[in-house]
Amino acid sequence: MKIGLLGLKKSGKTTIFNALTGLTASVDSFSSKKVEPNLGNVEVHDERITKLSALYQPQKTIYANIEYIDFVGLTDKEEALPANLLAMAKTTDAIALVVRNFQNEILDETFGEVEPETDIQKINSELIFSDLVIVEKRLENIILAKKRGIDQQKLKLEEKALLKIQKALTEEEPIRTIELTTEEEKALKGFQFLTKKPIFVILNSDENNFGKNEATLKKIEETFPAIEFAGNFEMELIDLSTNEADEFMKDLGINYSARDRLTDFSYHILNYISFFTVGKDEVRAWTLTKGATALAAAARIHSDLARGFIRAECFSFTDLMEAGSEKKLREIGKFRLEGKDYIVQDGDIISIRFSV
């Protein structure tokens, strides 16, 4: 899973990034000319993997992974995003819009008063504008292709879909709100539009007003899913012991870490579940879209398994823990053979039978 953090300058993106990853990327200068993003990988804490590893004693234990990309702060001008940012943003599974919800006299003077909803509109406008630039450039190329005598049916379908998207973007409507036919979706498969991706908001508050922004969150949630962090506070927890961090979080009414909260939130937004593969060599967690089939799970592990798919040996983590062993599972009839159309459930443990 790959999540991009986008926000206006001094929204606290890098502070959030550090709180999530445990890294110490610089947050000092809002006049920095740095354009390269900060990158960080985080293991998804899952007690089920820990327990499976204890049971199977594998050589390797591999947790699911989230890569966070902390992009350079955006301006509030309507302009196309920098090429390097655009290229990396296209590879993300979701985009988190980080918006400032903390007071700072210097920042207020330089960047304006705290207005989360206005900041979200500014960022959204930049994403819409960048998609519109891509659409209009492609439409220009299609017109040139027609002038050269290229008038394929595929090109006509792509043009029709792009014109539909262009109209919506011009009216400030993101692509994810547009109803496209299966054929139109197929024609646009090569594009990675930013406003087609899942987007959610991280409201970055300070310690003083954290947990007191229900009205603001409710308003934001009319457009985007939202979660509140006390970014600076949670970044400072990195240097504390586990017990100290737990005490400070309890004082602020935070039940668990920013990393775990955003992981759960991201899985919910992306509609992801986890399934597992187990054995003496490796115990591993995999992410999959809810409702996906055993064939999709096979492809997630390796394309060869999907091509030669025969059956999926399958049992649940819960049943395994209750039984204590695979042998006992077989004895009580909880060990199953499923076909390629089986809908994988969260917590399934799967082994693919396949032909070479």
Image (cartoon, rainbow, N blue to C red):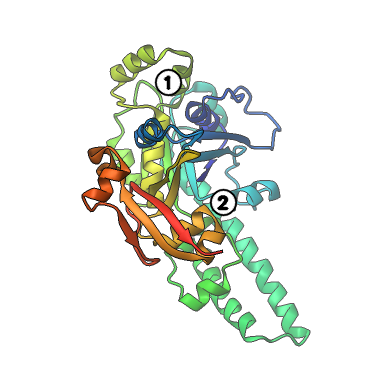
Q: Left of 35 or right of it: where is 105?
A: left
| Residue 14 vs residue 276, the one in the foreground | 276
184 relative position to 341: left or right: right
- The number of discs equals 2
Would residue 175 appear left or right of 79 to someone viewing this image?
left
| Mark 2: secondary structure | helix
Mark toward the start of the polypeptide (2 vs 1): 2
- Asked if residue 347 can be seen in this view, the reply is yes
Q: Position of residue 341 (x, y in %)?
A: 37, 67
Identify residue for label 1.
Answer: 233
Name the residue at 35% across, 56% down: 344
How crowded pointer 2 is (Cα within 10 Å; few <14, some 14-19, many 20+) is rated as many
The disc labelled 1 sits on which kind of residue?
Phe
Q: Quadrant of residue 177?
A: bottom left
User: In whole angstroms, how far apart are the C-alphas of marks 2 and 1?
Assistant: 29 Å
Location of mark 2 (residue): 126
Residue toward you, 185 or 226:
185
Whether residue 7 is visible to the viewer of this picture, yes or no, is no
Left or right side of 261 for 63: right
